[in-house]
Image (cartoon, helix red, strand yellow):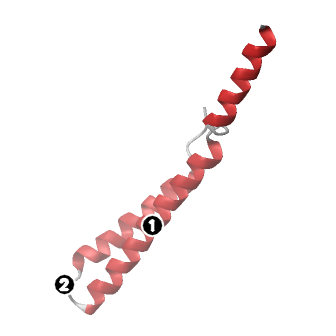
């Protein structure tokens, strides 16, 4: 099993901080729009980082695995 990546907690802490700032802004104002973009970028970074982590830690594609299994079965016959 893989350990919990450190970057998740760092990004989540940033997200909490920026969302707290966003909640204090007047909705629809220029400062609110700028802060909303900051929060959206952090959300995007978290999504991309999680996807990247899953792709890097996941074993090779299932197609490759199934080909190996077929070869093993054929070798035993």
54 vs 36, left or right, is right
Q: According to the image, label 2 marks what residue?
A: 26
The residue sitting at 23% across, 74% down in the picture is 23
In the displayed structure, would residue 21 be above or below residue 12?
Answer: below
Residue 2 pos. (x, y %): 61, 37
Residue furthest out toward the right? 75
Report how far apart the C-alphas of labels 2 and 1 lie in the structure: 23 Å
Q: Is residue 45 left or right of residue 21?
A: right
User: Residue placed at 61% from the left, 35% from the top?
Assistant: 62
Which quadrant of the figure contains the N terminus?
top right
Residue furthest to the top in view is: 77
Mark 1 residue element: helix
Image quadrant assignment for residue 52: bottom right
- Give coordinates of residue 28: x percent, y percent: 19, 86
Q: Relative to 6, does residue 57 appear above or below in the rendering?
A: above
Disc 1 target residue? 44
* Along the viewing direction, whichever of 56 and 60 lies nearer the viewer: 60
Residue 51: x and y in percent read: 53, 53
Q: Which SS class for mark 2?
A: loop
Residue drawn where x is 36% and y is 64% of the image = 16
Numbered tag placed on residue 27 in the rendering: none
Is 2 left or right of 77, judged from the image as shown? left
């Amino acid at each position: 099993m893989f350990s919990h990546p450190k970057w998740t907690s760092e990004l989540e802490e940033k997200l909490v901080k920026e969302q707290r700032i966003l909640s204090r802004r007047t909705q629809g104002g220029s400062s609110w729009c700028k802060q909303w973009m900051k929060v959206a970028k952090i959300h995007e970074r978290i999504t991309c980082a999680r996807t990247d982590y899953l792709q890097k830690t996941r074993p090779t594609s299932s197609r490759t695995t199934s080909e190996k299994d077929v070869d093993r079965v054929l070798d035993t016959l």
